[in-house]
Structure formats: structure tokens, C-alpha cells
Amino acid sequence: MRTYPVPWGRKDEQLWFQVNWLDGRQDVPDEDYGPGWVVVADLEKGTFDYPDRGKWINFDARPVVGEKRGTLWARYGPP
């Protein structure tokens, strides 16, 4: 997602992500901002730390490709 510049501001790039739990819960979307890109950096390392119900959980992360990616995008799509 790109925030377009306004006369008094600057252009920032950001991405959003949303955690969808296997039990059907969907957390509200969250954003990751540059230049640090903390979430992106973690995903590139194959890990993802995320708070759930007051405690941090560490997940293994890997790209979803092929037909499964399309199926998940159709199910969860953008928020």
C-alpha cells in the first residue's frame, strides 16, 4: 500500500497483514512501515512473532505458492 503525498507530508510505503487463526478468528489488520520493515524482515528469515491473548507466539513462516495461495487469497482476501 502506498500513501500518496500531501503538500505538508511525505510519501510512505507500508504493507498490511492480517492474522487468520485456524479456529476462525481474524485479527484486525496491522501495518508494517519502512525503513525498518520489522515484519517483512522476520518473514524473510522464516519466522514471525505475534501477540495472542497477552503473550507472544513465534511462528515458522514460509511462502504459500501455487493453487493453495489462490485458494487462501479467495478465502481471506484483503480486509
Image (cartoon, rainbow, N blue to C red):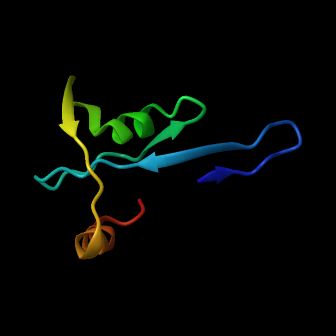
**Residue 54 picture quarter:** top left
- The residue most toward the right is 7
Is 76 drawn above or below residue 10 in the view shown? below
Determine the image quadrant of residue 38: top left
Q: Residue at x 22, y 71 (%)?
A: 68
User: In the picture shown, does residue 26 fall above or below 56?
Assistant: below
| Residue at 81% over, 37% down | 9
Q: Nearer the viewer, residue 16 or 47?
A: 47
- Residue 4 in the figure: left or right of residue 41: right
> From the viewer's perspective, is 8 left or right of 73?
right
Q: In the drawing, does residue 3 fall left or right of residue 21?
A: right
The residue lying toward the viewer, choosing from 6 and 48, is 48
Decide: is 55 above or below 29.
Answer: above
Q: Position of residue 25 (x, y in %)?
A: 19, 51
Residue 53 visible in the displayed image? no
Q: Residue at x 41, y 59 (%)?
A: 79
Q: Which percent across, then down, holds residue 10? A: 78, 38
- All told, the count of numbered labels is 0
Q: Which image quarter holds the N terminus?
A: bottom right
Residue 16 percent location from the top left of the image? 47, 48
Q: In the orientation shown, which residue stands out farthest toward the top?
A: 55
Residue extending furthest front?
45
